[in-house]
Image (cartoon, coloured by chain):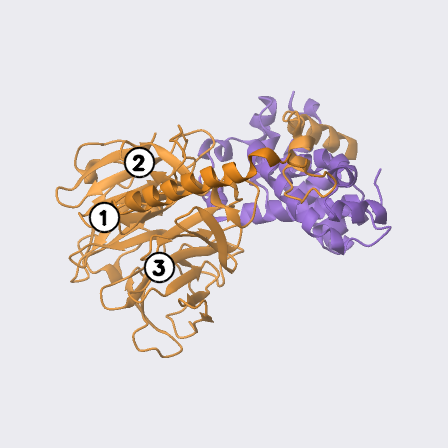
Amino acid sequence: MDELIRDRMHDALDAEPPPMGLRARVIGSVPMPDRTQRRPRRPRLQWVGPFASGVVAALLAVAVIGGLLYSRQAIPSPSLGSHPPSPARLIAPEGIAVAPDGTVYVSDNAGNRVFRLLPGGSLVSVAGGGVGADGQANKAHLWGPGALAVDREGNLYVADSFGGAVRRIDRQGVISTVTTLYGPQGLAFDSAGVLYVGSYYGVLRRIDARGETTDLDLSSLPSPAVQLGNMTFDGVGNLYVTDRAPITGIAPSPGGGCRIIRLNLTKKQTPVEGTVVAGTGTCGFSGDGGPATSAQLNDPYGIVFDADGNLYLADAGNHRIRRIDKNGIITTMAGTGVAGYGGDGGPATKAQLTYPLGLGITSGGLIYIADPNMDPTITPARVRAFRISDGTITTVAGG
Amino acid sequence: MTSTADPDLVARAKEGDRSAFDELIGPLVEQGYRLAYGMLHDREAAEDAVQEAAVRSWRKLGNVRPGSEMRPWFLAIVANQCRTTVRGRWWSVLRIELPAEAAAAGFEDQIVRGADLRAALRRLAPEHREVLVLHYYLDLPLDEIAVIAGLPIGTVKSRINRGLAAMRPFFRPMEAFS
């Protein structure tokens, strides 16, 4: 019998033999310092020494002055994504961030990269795709980048979800590690520039400008324990977090999830006070046109506030974008509830979305939506944009 | 066949000698890929898992004791990577959305049609899939599987039995359906 099982297993799995060159690729990918090879010595050109020094100094001076003049112009993120645009393919876009200067960033959770979105829909890689740790962002290794946030200075923060870290990419394109924790899923800055990081495993971490780190006590939040997703601040300092759909075997507690919770961080007290503002704690779909606290959500992820104080959420498992207005009434604003793709140029409520995740909003009321497909291995993914003013939707990247 | 950790090779690899690292880990890469593919059923994800495991194994080389066996040590890292991948949010989304027709079709019908054992393996709980792949595909002994999975041998046996029970229709002789 054992032989039969072995034969069947080999029949099934040998169909996909190890790819050619696997060993060399795998061993070669390890970023070890190669101390066995000496760096060739650079020949010295002694005869041009004094002359060359003068020329180099003059060129440097011109470059510095030119650079200063150039930098006074309003050019967003001069170094982040300064590489030429490439026909990048989105596999599973997850996080979206809109910088204060309007630059849009998209993370690709399965492609392990972060891109800058250009107006024409091209994507420029700004981080990931390499094997390095800290250093040049375009040579760094990211693993499952999800939520994104941009600070007031324009530095980009990435929740590297499988990598278990929050990484910071400065305007020179240098990446560094801000903090490490399991499953970071949400990032948000408060009005004072303090960074909050939420993890799927229920940790909410506060990191101030000096790098001082505090894990907040969430023991008083409405039970069961939250699986933090994305997060955003309202105009008065409350932090809104999505409580994801629980994953069996991983969620901190059985049941629950599928809620939006408002955390009152203005009182500076512990444990943190929390109020459910949407969802019943049972995943599903219901409640449009009624109070959000009586409505069912299904794996909510991205959330943003518009300028009028309405909260938009990506109700991923319901394939919809929903709005909770200032009176607490929930309404579908995009998506039909059936997973798919279509409806560009028309009313968003008649368009299909697949599994909307991250949201980012511009000052003009355009909401970017990371819309990965259910199977990134066979289908392209997209970034779509919903315009609040007329309720229309279109595709801006991918596809 | 397995190899023991040569302290000299380990020390050289730690120093950044890529050929020493290749000598230690290189022969295990293919088995690592087969394990990862058996667990993940996705070529790119399997290669990513092995690549990540190689990076981690280099970082952890200092933990290898002289004379200990490299294969279970490396495969344990690969298995751990695969478990992390399977636990990931995105992966769970994919698994939730498995095509309904595969589940609806009878097991026997699938076999008669030569249909996919891999699909059945994919539906198996990851902990059961892992031990079945290690035992029946990589032909590893139970004690080595126990090290890789970080479990007592008794638990390994029970997981194999449970996995086999779920897969039983696939492991009947073909004549039974002719």
Residue A282 position by quadrant: bottom left
Residue tagged 3: A188
Percent x, y of residue A83: 41, 35
Labels 2, 3: front one:
2
Which one is earlier in the sequence, the residue at label 1 or at label 3?
3
Q: Quadrant of the N terminus of chain B?
A: top right
Percent x, y of residue A340: 32, 34
Residue A118 numbered mark, or none: 2
Q: What is the chain letter for disc 2?
A: A
Q: At label 1, which amino acid type do we have? A: Thr
Q: At label 2, which amino acid type do we have? A: Leu
Which one is earlier in the sequence, the residue at label 1 or at label 2?
2
Is residue B6 in sight in this rendering?
Answer: no
Percent x, y of residue B141: 81, 43
Residue A362 numbered mark, or none: 1
Percent x, y of residue A35: 72, 43
Q: Residues within 10 Å of mark 3 (few under 14, many from 20)?
A: many
Please tell me the colour of chain A: orange
Q: Pick the residue in front: A352 or A49.
A: A49
